[in-house]
Amino acid sequence: MPFYYYFDPTYILVLIGVLLCMAASAKLNATYNKYQRIRSYSGMTGAEAAQRILYQAGIRDVRVEHISGNLTDHYDPRNKVLRLSDTTYGSASVAAVGVAAHECGHAMQHAHGYIPLSLRSALVPVANFGSAIAWPLILFGLLIGSRSSGMLITAGILAFSAAVLFQIVTLPVEFNASGRALRMLEDNGILQSEEIRMTRKVLSAAALTYVAGAASAILQLVRILLLTNRRRD
C-alpha cells in the first residue's frame, strides 16, 4: 500500500502546535539574550528591584529567594515566595529587572485577590491529572470498541479539556502581571522610559510562549475530537 494510506492528516495540527511553541521559545530566548546584555541605568539587580516593588506595593510577607536555572523564575502563592533564577537574581540587566518585576506582578495579584489567578491555582491539580489521564482513556476507549467505550472517550475529552482551560485562563494572568510590572517599574523610577520599552519587548516575547501553548493545546483538543468522531462514524 502507498505511504499516504497510513498518513493521519490530523498530525498536521500537532505539527502546527509544535512549530508555534518552537517559534515562540526562540523569540523569547533571542529577545531575552539581547536585553540581558544591557545593564539598567539604576544598577539594581533583579532581586533588589523585586524587593523594592514589593515594599512599595505594601507587600511585606513575600520572601525573595534564589533558585537555580535559566528563566525558572516564578511566584509560589502557597508559601508566598518569589523565586528568581540565576540569570535574574543577581543580574542588573534590563531583562532581569523586567522578569523580576513580572513575578512581583503575580505576588500583587495574589495579595489583591485577582480572580483569574485564583482560578488558575485551583485548576492546577485538575489540569495535571487531566493531561496525564486523557490519552490513556481515549485510546483504551477506541481499542475496546464496547458500549462503555463512548463513556471512556468522553471522559478523556473532558479531562483534556480541563488542561486546555488551564492554558486559556493562564493568558489573562500573565498579561495582567506584565502590565502591573511595567507600571511599577515606571512609577518607582527603577527603569527609565527607554528601558521600559526594552522590558516591554522581553515581557511580550514571554507572553507569546503562553499564547503558543494555549494554541497548541486547543489544536490538540481539535485533533482528539476529529479522531474520536471518525472512530464513532
Image: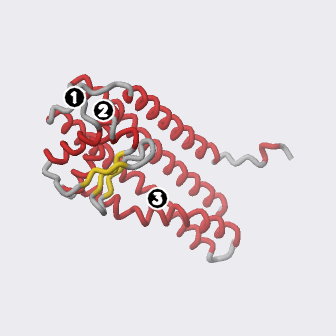
Q: Secondary structure at mark 1?
A: loop
Q: Position of residue 23 (x, y in %)?
A: 51, 34
Q: Secondary structure at mark 3?
A: helix
| Disc ID at residue 163 | 3
Q: CA distance from mark 1 to mark 2?
A: 8 Å
Residue depicted at 31% across the width and 49% down the height: 173
Identify the residue position indicated by label 2 in the image.
92
Q: Is residue 145 positioned above or below 98 on the image?
A: below
Tell me the crowding category of disc 1: few under 14, some 14 to 19, or many 20 or more residues within 10 angstroms, Cα based. some
> Is tag 1's residue or tag 3's residue first in the polypeptide sequence?
1
Task: State the scheme by which the image is colored.
Answer: secondary structure
Residue depicted at 16% across the width and 31% down the height: 189
Tell me which corner region of the image, top left, top right, bottom left or bottom right, holds residue 88: top left
Q: Is residue 44 positioned above or below 63 on the image?
A: above
Tell me which amino acid carries mark 1.
Ser
Tell me which amino acid carries mark 3.
Ala
Identify the residue position indicated by label 1 in the image.
42
Q: CA distance from mark 2 to mark 3?
A: 36 Å
> Is tag 2's residue or tag 3's residue first in the polypeptide sequence?
2
Tell me which corner region of the image, top left, top right, bottom left or bottom right, holds residue 162: bottom left
* Label pair 1/2, CB-CB below 8 angstroms: yes
